[in-house]
Image: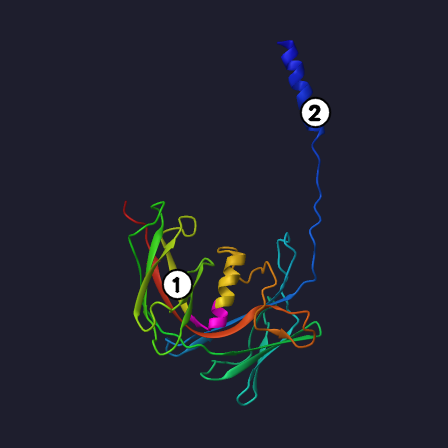
Amino acid sequence: MKNIKIIFVFLTLIFASCEKVVDIDVPTIPPKLIIDASFEVFFDENPVTANNVVKLKLSADYFDETIPVVTNATVFLTNLNDNTVINFADVNLDGNYEPTSSFIPEDNIIYELTVIHDNQTYKGKATKVKSTPLTSVVQGDKTLFSGEETELKVDFTDDGTVENHYLFDFTQNIYLALEDRYFNGSDYNFSYFYQEDEIELPTNVTIKMTGISKEYYTYFRVLIDQSGQNAGGPFQSVPSSLLGNMINTTNEENFPLGYFHIGESDTFSLDLVEKNN
């Protein structure tokens, strides 16, 4: 019995002496400007309102816990039909630039966004994308695998005269990009399921549907695949050099990350309650 104990202690010492601390050098890259400029026009409200915010940040290394915001940029929007300029300002010094005067993006107007930062000029163009209102959003009774999911039943009517793409925001940084390939011009309804760890009942949620361009639809799907859901939002951090529609006109090699888009949006609020088991 004593021999067994001696062998055990000997083996423990051997394996303990084999432990090593391995330092892995993670490559760092110069920070890139992230431009999150997704304008929303709430066309189904009376009066019509808009959320026109340009969010500016700098990309950070993979293990950094914080992403620096940009508060010293010059931001303005140009109406290319009449060359009028809408200036933006970061009043709260939080990286969120808003129009200095009331502004509602108009139909069939090409807008050019200009961001000047660190002696570099970035530009991108967008035209407002039309959408359709939500017909209804209700809580359903169905579940999926665990039996603890919460169902949302969403209904709207697609415009059959054009090819449409939609972006749904289910709150909690949960998004769904949808195209009308299989329901063009139809009354369309689908179910979305919150996972048990995504939402705590009872609660109130606001569902948002925004009309988006085909290019933004493709961009957003790739972005969601790379960044994942519930990761602080798709523009919280960009894990790879995913090119958007903003161009660095000063130095093309120092391209920015992010996107400039304008779309019509509609919202629907409802109370979610616990299911009766």
- Looking at the rendered structure, the kind of residue marked 1 is Thr
- In the shown orientation, is residue 18 left or right of residue 203? right
Residue 105 is tagged as: none
Q: What's the residue at 59%, 58% (across, down)?
A: 239
* Residue 243 can be seen in this image: yes
- In the shown orientation, is residue 26 left or right of residue 80? right
Could you tell me residue 178's position as x and y percent?
Answer: 41, 65
Nearest the eye: 277 or 156 = 156
Could you tell me residue 194's position as x and y percent?
Answer: 39, 53
> Compared to 192, does 246 lie above or below?
below
Q: What's the residue at 52%, 83% (across, down)?
A: 110
Q: Residue furthest bottom?
A: 82
The colour scheme applied to this rendered structure is: rainbow
Q: Earlier in the sequence, mark 2 or mark 1?
A: 2
> Compared to 275, does 209 lie above or below?
below
Quadrant the C terminus occupies: top left
- Marks 2 and 1, Cα distance to the nearest angstrom? 60 Å
Name the residue tied to disc 2: 14
Asked whether residue 196 is drawn in magenta, I would say: no
**What range is drawn magenta here?**
210-217
Could you tell me residue 25's position as x and y percent?
Answer: 71, 49
Nearest the eye: 54 or 177 = 177
* Residue 232 can be seen in this image: no
Name the residue tied to disc 1: 206
- In the shown orientation, is residue 42 left or right of residue 117? left
Nearest the eye: 201 or 226 = 226
> Compared to 268, does 10 lie above or below?
above
- Looking at the rendered structure, the kind of residue marked 2 is Ile
